[in-house]
Amino acid sequence: MILALVCAAMMMPMNAKTLVAYFSATGTTKAAAEKLAKQQDARLWEIEPAEPYSASDLDWRNPQSRSSIEMNDPNERPMIKQCTDVTPYDTVYVGFPIWWGICPRIINSWLDNNEPQLQGKVLIPFATSGSSGINDAETYLKKTYPTLNWQRGLLLNKQ
């Protein structure tokens, strides 16, 4: 699928060096991202799908649900509403809920769009999950985006 995104630059403080970019389907990862951004004195950016996920879209038990279809196709790249200019940042935290042991495909959409601008930056994945760890997601991100500077990730379940 060809990824056609319209990027919108956001207003940033001149001293902004850290970005917390996240996708949250149910609000759990959003809460973790907000807390992390406050702790790191970082800019917060929500990675939003062009078409929001409904409860039925998120039903992982249904093989025909949107999330199941996306996660079963490694080439799937859901459209995102808009992206941010990552060039001013030295460190970028990338947050998501764990889906099928890894990051949701919308994270791939965001990374694919920003990959050239993320070169040379410190990238730290963080995730929320009811039962999974972050290790498989870290491995997946490093394998899928080997030229990016991935650091050890954070599992932020209890906020």
Image (cartoon, rainbow, N blue to C red):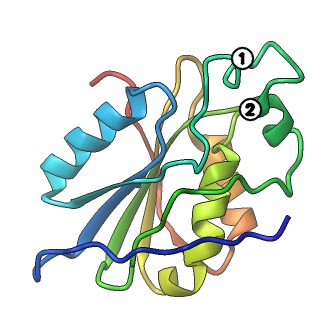
Report the residue at 39% width, 25% height from top: 157
Residue 134 at x, y percent in the picture: 56, 39
Report the residue at 53% width, 17% height from top: 130
Amino acid type of the residue that numbered disc 2 sits on in the rendered structure: Ser
Residue 117's disc is none
Q: Quadrant of the N terminus?
A: bottom right
> Circle 2 sits in a helix, a strand or a loop, which is it?
helix
Badge 2: few (under 14), some or many (20 or more) residues near its Cα, within 10 Å? many
- Label whose residue precedes the other's in the sequence (2 or 1): 1
Tell me if label 2 and label 1 are in contact, CB under 8 Å.
yes
Residue 67's disc is 2
Q: Is residue 134 left or right of residue 43?
A: right
Instruction: Identify whether 7 is placed above or below 153.
Output: below
Report the residue at 64% width, 81% height from top: 147
> Residues under labels 2 and 1: Cα distance?
7 Å
| Residue to which mark 1 is pinned | 59
Badge 1: few (under 14), some or many (20 or more) residues near its Cα, within 10 Å? some
